[in-house]
Structure formats: C-alpha cells, structure tokens
Image (tube, helix red, strand yellow):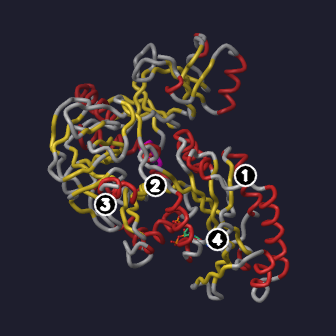
Amino acid sequence: MNDLQREVNKRRTFAIISHPDAGKTTLTEKMLLLGGAIRTAGSVKAKKSAKFATSDWMELEKQRGISVTSSVMQFEYEGYKINILDTPGHQDFSEDTYRTLMAVDSVVMILDVAKGVEPQTIKLFKVCSERGIPIFTFINKLDRHGKEPLELFEEIEAVLGIESTPMNYPIGMGPTFRGVYDRSDKTIEYYGEDRDEQTSREVSDYEELQAQLSNNTDEATIDQLIEDLRLLDEAGNPFDLDAVMKGKQTPVFFGSAISSFGVPTFLKHFLRMAPPPASRQSSKGTVHPDDEEFSGFIFKIQANMDPAHRDRVAFLRICSGKFEKGMETWLHRTGKSMKLSQPQQFFADSRAAVEEAYAGDIVGLYDPGVYQIGDTICGSKNTFDFGRLPMFPPEHFAKIRPKNAMKHKQYVKGIEQLAQEGAIQVYRTPKFEETILGAVGQLQFDVFLYRMEHEYGVDLLMERWPYQLARWVVKGEVPDKDTRSDTRMLIHDYRGRPVLLFKNEFSMNWFLDHNPDMELADSPASVPE
Ligand code: G4P
C-alpha cells in the first residue's frame, strides 16, 4: 500500500441526516468530543448563533435563526480522518442540503425514538437511497419513552423501504433505560445509576445476560428483552454487509446522545463498516480515489461567509489523488488552468490554510465568481467531467420582476449568476415569458431577494405561488385547458422542458386520473433527451 492509498483508506466522509430536533447537533458534538476536536459540550450549538453575528448577511441569518458556519468539520479518531458534512435543516433547508449528500460516501440517519421516521428524514433518505450509499441508523433519546424497537424496524421498512438490522438492542426505555445489548460483540453496555458512566461486560449467552441484568433491571424488562432478541435471531434480517454497502440494509443502533450513551460504540462500529472514499464515474470512465491524478467537484457555493469581504466559498470534494498547496489545476468547463486560491480546511472551531488534502476531504476555495455548482477540477490539462449534479424538485414557487424597469440588465445578470451558482432554479411561463423561481427551501427566496438587492442593486417584486409539487412531463401533451388554474400551472425549465406545478398531491392525482396518457416524473433525469 502506498502513502496515497493509506491516506485514502483512513478517510470517512459522511453526513448526518435527520428531521429537526432528533439530535443531529448533539450527536455531532459528542463525536467531536470523543475525537478531542472540541473540549466542552455546547460549542457547536453556541457557534450556530454567536459567530459572525455582526454582518448584515448574518443579520438575515440571525433573524431566521439559521447557521452556515459549521458546513464541514474534520477530526481524527482512532486512526481515522473523519469529515462530517452538515445538512442544514430547519428553515435553512435548501438545495444545498441535498447537494451535500452528493459529496459523502455514507450517511448516519438519526431518528427520535418517540417520533420515528419524520418528513424531512424521508426526503433526505430518498436522495441517499437513489445514490445507493450506505445508511447507518442511530435511534436517539432512549432516556425518554418512545416507540417499541420492533415497531420502529417495521416503520423503517414500511416508510423508507429499506431492510433494517439492529446491531444493538435497548434494555428498557425512558426511566427504566439500563443500557444496550450489543448483538455482534455479545456485550452489555450499562448505564450507571446517575447516568454519567458506562461500563460494559461480555456475556456468553442469553442465560448469562438474564443473570447479569437481574440485579438492576426489573423482570418484565428482562423478559421482554430476551423475547425480542430471540425473535430477532429467528425472524429478523440477518446482518449483510454487502447489502449495507449497497444501501439496501441499514444497521440500527440505539442510544442517548445527550448523555453520550451508546455514542462510542456506535462510532466504533460505524467507522469499521463505513466505506472509505468511493470510486466515481466520469466522462473518462471510473475515477478511483487512489488514482495519482488529482480531481474533485464543487458541490456547494456559499455566499458571504466572511462578512468583511463580499466573497464566496466554493466547497470542493476531492475525488482522487492528493491536493497540495499552490498546485496547478484545470477547470473542465473552461479548460483554463488556475491555482486554487486560498484553499481552506474546516475544523470544529476554526478554519486553516490547507497544505495537503486527499480524496475524501473537503476543501473550501475562495471564489471570486469563477465556479459553478457541479464544476469538475482536474490535476492535468486533459480534463474530464463528473457530470452535472442532479436537480432537486422545488417545493416553493414565486413570480418575480424588477421594481424598476431601468434595472433590467442587472436583473438578468443577477438571475443568471445566482441560478448558475445553484442558489435558485429559474423557470418561465410559456406565453408571457414571466420569470418563475423555484426553491427547495423557502429561505432561498429571502436570500435571493437580499442578494439581488445588495449584490446587483435590484429591488424585486415577488408574488408567491400556492403550488408545492413540480413534475416534469415525460410523456403526453398537457391539454390547453389544463395549463393554468388554481391547482396547476404549466411552466418551462431552463432547457424549455415542460414542468407541471400542482397545489398538492390531490390535485396531481386528479389531473393524472383525467389524463391517463400522461406520464410525469419528479426530476428531469427521467425526461427523454
Ligand atoms: P438537531 O440538531 O437535530 O435539531 O437536534 P439537537 O441536537 O439540537 O437536539 C434537539 C433537542 O433534543 C435538544 O433539546 C437536545 O438537548 C435534545 N436531545 C438531544 N439528544 C437527546 C437525548 O439523547 N435525550 C434527550 N432527552 N434529549 C436529547 P433542546 O431543549 O431543544 O435544546 P437544549 O436547550 O437542550 O440545547
């Protein structure tokens, strides 16, 4: 194994997906604490609100209570180099959240034991599952009452359509939560009485498990545990690493992130199972992470991270080779050579200039406006392309026009640049060529209005539309009478492909029932060229 392969094999690049409040920040923080990347709990959360609070850009963030600061965090743990990519939720849910999932090799899905599979989890899960990447599940808040584990497995399979296999199993729940039984290591992990210590002990079989638990756990809890474990042994899905790697089975872990219970074991198993950086397809064939030639792609562009400068940071996922400071690279889209300027890497509480980075790592590049989402950057003149990032179906729509017709030129330029940057999707109405914006998250509109005003000097009039679903027309003609109504609207995307907007699922199904020859898809990927 050469140095490059050794470095690549150490890397684990993943995102945590969850519905707001399931415990993503808490789990991230506990992992960073374990890795020694932060010293006190609370720092990730504090950072969410405190940093950069002075800028007007951040003023917008503050008003909306959102964060852009902890996009990527790197830390080391037991010989691994870990890159955690943030998937912003709450109000700052946007296309960036989805695109981040294009840059990771696996994901951790957190479920709240009481709430199970929630709407935002479903959306994020779908994007991961379409990529076929491994998904590991952490069921959180076992210190509180919640759904029964077997009920949760059923829910995961029924709602998400993925097999689940518990790696450990909770002993009690809520006030009676005593710990977990690790099925693969045949170990009990105990929670101390005051819930601040954890001890573990191996047991050879369920009789010994029963005997071990009998001095601190009530009989009903023990009986239920043994019954469930026996049932899982007989009728549960057996662990299948191959299926996990293909995203067809998710290993499930239980714990309580707030007290760090179950987090070390989860991290240990997860890091062992999670894959190192994967190979990727490109216009020149498969690119392997340990190929000598450097390559990567831009998956996210963040405007004005540093309030002192109106700059942007482009996030580059390295896909192959080694990045070295000052090296010459080529941008595939333009064919131009360039030195990557001011490359930075991000740690839990700081950023630092990058000296070297490897496949799997994320580098932030100062962007004076040269990059676009999905750009491939290569280490040689013979460039190639990783292809466009998918377009994600918007759920919010608005019609816009400039307040002042004299500003038309800046208006067109601003829309073009911000659409290229991936901040917003642009559509047009067929007859009148009105400009329609589509966004995955509502905040994208606020950010768009703000940036049009502050970066391009254009005040906009915006009229929100009541539609929620966008469906690309795969087959059939939309009848004239159906092109504009309260419940649906025909528009065209940037390539002139027809897209139907619907008010809700009901209006879409009604339309399909009345137009049985039509076929619709929720992404342009299924539209024939
Ligand atoms: P998020 O990033 O996914 O949105 O969730 P976050 O970690 O911020 O956690 C959401 C809330 O759930 C927080 O409470 C957090 O303390 C709590 N929480 C996280 N893990 C556990 C757990 O294992 N058990 C219990 N009981 N609670 C947990 P909060 O009151 O909203 O915030 P805070 O004031 O505690 O920070």
Instruction: Ligand 1: give its quadrant.
Output: bottom right
Mark 2 secondary-structure assignment:
strand
Q: Pick whichever of labels 4 and 2 is earlier in the sequence.
A: 2
Q: Is the residue 247 above or below the residue 495 in the image? A: below
Which residue shows up at 81% across the image and 58% down it?
A: 234
The residue that mark 4 highlights is 185
Q: Pick whichever of labels 1 and 2 is earlier in the sequence.
A: 2
What amino acid type should be assigned to the residue bearing mark 4?
A: Asp
Mark 3 secondary-structure assignment:
strand
Is residue 19 something one can see in this rendering? no
Give the crowd class for mark 2: few <14, some 14-19, many >=20 residues within 10 Å.
many
The residue that mark 3 highlights is 346
Dominant secondary-structure state across the stretch colored magenta: helix
Find residue 523 and report its horizontal and vertical position in percent.
52, 29
What amino acid type should be assigned to the residue bearing mark 3?
A: Phe
Give the crowd class for mark 3: few <14, some 14-19, many >=20 residues within 10 Å.
many
Report the Cα–Cα distance between label 4 and label 3. 35 Å
Mark 1 touching mark 3, by CB under 8 A?
Answer: no
Which residue shows up at 52% across the image and 68% down it?
A: 268
Report the Cα–Cα distance between label 4 and label 1. 26 Å
Q: Is mark 4 within 8 Å of ligand 1?
A: no
Mark 4 touching mark 1, by CB under 8 A?
Answer: no
Find residue 83 and report its horizontal and vertical position in percent.
39, 58
Mark 1 secondary-structure assignment:
helix
Say which mark, if any, is on residue 337: none
Report the Cα–Cα distance between label 2 and label 3. 15 Å
Q: Pick whichever of labels 2 and 3 is earlier in the sequence.
A: 2
Which stretch did the figure color magenta? 93-97
Mark 4 touching mark 2, by CB under 8 A?
Answer: no
Q: Pick whichever of labels 4 and 1 is earlier in the sequence.
A: 1
